[in-house]
Amino acid sequence: MSFHGIERRGLMLVLSSPSGAGKTTISRRLLEHEDALEMSVSVTTRPRRPGEVEGRDYWFVSPADFNIMVNERKLLEWAKVFGNHYGTPKGPVADALARGRDVLFDIDWQGTQQLAEHARDDLVSIFILPPSTRELERRLRQRAQDPEDVVAARMAKASDEISHWAEYDYVVLNEDVDSTLAQVRAILHAERLKRRRQTGLGDFVKRLRDGV
Ligand SMILES: Nc1nc2c(ncn2[C@@H]2O[C@H](COP(=O)(O)OP(=O)(O)O)[C@@H](O)[C@H]2O)c(=O)[nH]1
Ligand SMILES: Nc1ncnc2c1ncn2[C@@H]1O[C@H](COP(=O)(O)OP(=O)(O)O)[C@@H](O)[C@H]1O
């Protein structure tokens, strides 16, 4: 990746939050604005929701196929969430990073911990908090795509998920979508400028010094 003509190493941007806090909304908006960013599309055994698109939101697979992917080590990380399995296919992430692109992950704390074990230096993690419990419940119901018992289960798990907030590099409160988006973009832009990510800086500075 070239940034002002200087080679840069791609980064892995993780968004986690309790269900309903707004990860999907923020991810979609972010991808509209950030050309150099690609979504990591997970595989899941969860049923497809109305409006979800195969290959855009998830790859929907059977439990048997998921197990095959685990056994063949095709997943970078995987976890069981709300009784279903979710995992990150390895290939597309490696390809994107090799092309110098950044990769966005909508994964839970278990997946974030696994990525941190393998690629801490390339990882930038953001935890998204809802403004209040009431608002979280309102958002989960408003989405109205899950049956009532699923909404209740997700609310019951919210406290567990939130308990991992301090394991993240950044924490953003998602009150208003536009300002959350601006904050996440600011984090991404600053992280891209980290010296160790600008791999072409040494050569650039050498040419600069040679010229003076
Ligand atoms: N570890 C891991 N978690 C995932 C993956 N894909 C999705 N998740 C998480 O699984 C949880 C449930 O996702 P989903 O069923 O789409 O509901 P959501 O909470 O509305 O996004 C969320 O916390 C996601 O971040 C994955 O590949 N790995
Ligand atoms: N800042 C916000 N203000 C109001 N509603 C929001 C906000 N962010 C997300 N939502 C709504 O809340 C619901 C859950 O958001 P979603 O992005 O699906 O959350 P998650 O992916 O974390 O489960 C959706 O109906 C979405 O439109």
Image (cartoon, rainbow, N blue to C red):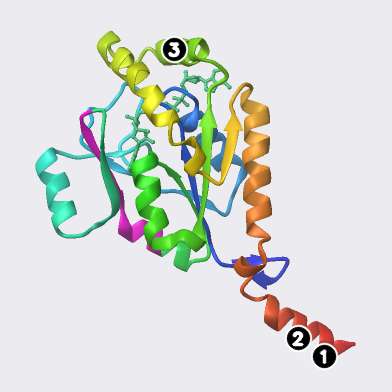
Whole-number angstrom distance, CA of label 1 to CA of label 3: 60 Å
Kindly identify the amino acid type of the residue bearing the numbered disc 1: Asp
Whole-percent x, y for residue 90 in the image: 31, 58
User: Within 8 Å of ligand 1, the CB of disc 2?
Assistant: no
Give the mark toward the camera: 1 or 3: 3
Whole-percent x, y for residue 123 in the image: 49, 55
Contact? badges 2 and 1 (CB < 8 Å): yes
Whole-number angstrom distance, CA of label 3 to CA of label 2: 55 Å
Between residues 135 and 57, which one lies in front from this camera angle? 135
Label 2 CA crowd tier, 10 Å (few <14, some 14–19, many 20+) = few
Residue at 48% x, 43% y is 167
Residue linked to disc 2: 206
Residue at 61% x, 73% y is 199
Assess whether residue 148 is covered by the magenta stretch.
no
Whole-percent x, y for residue 60 in the image: 24, 37
Residue linked to disc 3: 137
Kindly identify the amino acid type of the residue bearing the numbered disc 2: Lys
Of callouts 1 and 3, the N-terminal one: 3
Question: In this image, 16 relative to 35: left or right?
Answer: left
Q: The magenta stretch spans which residues?
A: 83-94
Q: Residue furthest left?
A: 64
- Which quadrant of the rendered structure holds the N terminus? bottom right
Residue 156 has which mark? none
Image height of 161 relative to 99, above or below: above
Residue at 19% x, 40% y is 61
Kindly identify the amino acid type of the residue bearing the numbered disc 3: Glu
Residue 210 has which mark? 1
Image height of 3 relative to 154, above or below: below
